[in-house]
Image (tube, rainbow, N blue to C red):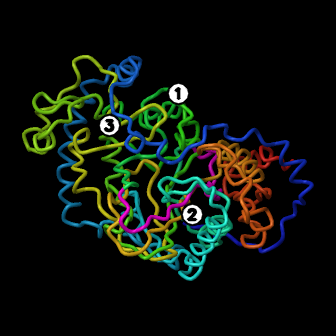
Amino acid sequence: MLRTIQTLRTPCRLSKLRLSNQLRTAATAASGKAEGTIADSFASLSGQQFEALEPRFAAVKENLIRGNEQAVKASWDRLLLTLKDEVQEIKRSGSSIVPQIDFKDIDAPSEHFSSEYRKRGVAVIKGAIPEAEALQMKEDLREYIKANPQTKSFSQQVFELYWSKSQIRARGHPNLLKAQQFLLSFWHSKDPNALFSDTPISYCDRLRMREPGDAKFALGPHVDGGSCERWEETGYGRGKVYQDIWEGNWEKYDPWESSSRLPVESDLYQGAGACSAFRAAQGWLSMSHCTAFEGTLLVNPLLQLATAYFLLRPFFTPRNGPSNQVSVKGAFEQANTDDYLSPDNWKLEDKPTSWLQGANLGRGQELNALLHPHLNLPETMVHIPRVQPGDYVVWHCDGIHAVDKIHAGKSDSSVLYIPACPLTERNAEYLVRQRDCFLRGTPSPDFPGGIGESQHIGRAVQEDISAVSGVNGLRAMGLERFDENAGRTPGEKKVMASANRTLGFN
């Protein structure tokens, strides 16, 4: 399954002069997004209320299922019955339902792990980086933050940092690149010539250092990678990612098909923190020992079913009981009864409304127990198993996830956000912009803008990548050409050649 990444610890072949001339000319301007924090990415953190969207979204919904209304209704009924059984399985299993694998075993994963990861869409890779290294990264980060008190953050928990030496060291770590390639190998394409390579690129994200007692970073169930875009023709509709669901065949929907994701526009509204790259798996590297209720992650291990549900939910309304707009005392209790949840109590909207439950323009997709009652989120959002420094936690790009409302532990819960991203043409274009941000010291393109770390003391430079990551780490950052001869398929060879041109390696 896994093609081994050979790490060559050689100095970068690109001189500073070449970087300033060749690579910078290939780069576009930096993000241009307004300054901000992670709070600007989600309605619940910024105080925005869920409400009906622009009237045009009623037409968007109508067009999506036009001619398939009865098939969609029948599929909804099947979905609710299947969900009822799966919810019970999660309630019985709890955190043990999340598959785990030791890093040393990823060259030959068990069939049980592979099938469970495909079904659940979440996993823990134990010991991806040695514990001592992960702990040193955390200590170095503390020193970096101390040396740069002007660093922006959300409540001193989520820091607007992208270019610390610890982050650079973690992203380019040979073990982490190997783990990412392992994760990307689970994707497949119905198009044998799809321009997709499981060679990972570095997507430079933020970090979290959550202290005991914190209740401010209480981000509830949500999905990254856009919100309204999932229903829009110019968003995920460009690749018809969810076409089987819109046609009433959610059982045929394959969350792991890659070619349909390649043309997707997941950031139509320049949202703060909205993702324009293809992040196949979200992920973070633990720098702490933590377990349930200690500021850790919760996931919903119902990948295919949950995706179909939150996409179809806006088309249906209950005959009796709380409507999608109502949040009053006792509403949840009314919405958590067998009669309310029964397929017989749900019908297609008589006339499409502009509601997309939990979606707002330029914000992340959020979910809650009232808007999405059949998911039974209070019981199906399970904590990931206990993690230690160096463990790599990952979840599918459509996966529902959340964080503990309160950090009730006794020590910090610290992570580096590091997703697994394949090499694609769109991601190569993103690398150009991200590389320019790295050279400038400004925030990564998908994130709130401003001067970032351009004036920070001790931020990472190109030589730091070369010293700790070798040629594969440099490639992942767009600082070294990809080896086109390493491609195993015509599509992979072609995307590597295309990426080299995009990155300025002619």
504 horizontally vs 116: left or right = right
Whether residue 37 is situated above or below residue 150 in the rendered picture: above
Would you say the residues marked 1 and 3 are in contact, meaning their CB atoms lie under 8 Å apart? no
Q: Position of residue 169 (x, y in %)?
A: 66, 69
Give the residue type that dot 2 points to. Answer: Gln
Query: What residue appears at the point 72 percent right and 49 percent down from the top-left corner?
Result: 437
Of the numbered discs in the image, which one, if any, rests on residue 249? Answer: 3
Q: Earlier in the sequence, mark 2 or mark 3?
A: 2
Which residue carries the number 1 mark?
234
Per the image, label 2 sits on a secondary structure element best described as helix
Which type of secondary structure does the marked residue at label 1 adopt?
Answer: loop
Q: Provide residue 411's location: percent of width, then percent of height.
A: 41, 75
Amino acid type, residue under disc 1 in the picture = Thr
User: Between marks 2 and 3, how big is the CA–CA gap?
Assistant: 31 Å
How packed mark 2 is, by other alpha carbons closer than 10 Å (few <14, some 14-19, many 20 or more), is many
* Quarter where residue 249 is shown: top left
Magenta portion: prevailing SS class: loop
Q: In the image, what residue occupies the spot 49% across and 76% down?
A: 389
Residue 83, above or below 239:
below
10 Å neighbourhood of mark 3: few (<14), some, or many (≥20)? some
Q: Residue type at mark 3: give it.
A: Asn
Q: Which mark is residue 180?
A: 2
Residue displayed at 52% across by 52% down: 280
Q: Residues in magenta?
A: 191-215
Q: Is residue 320 left or right of residue 497?
A: left
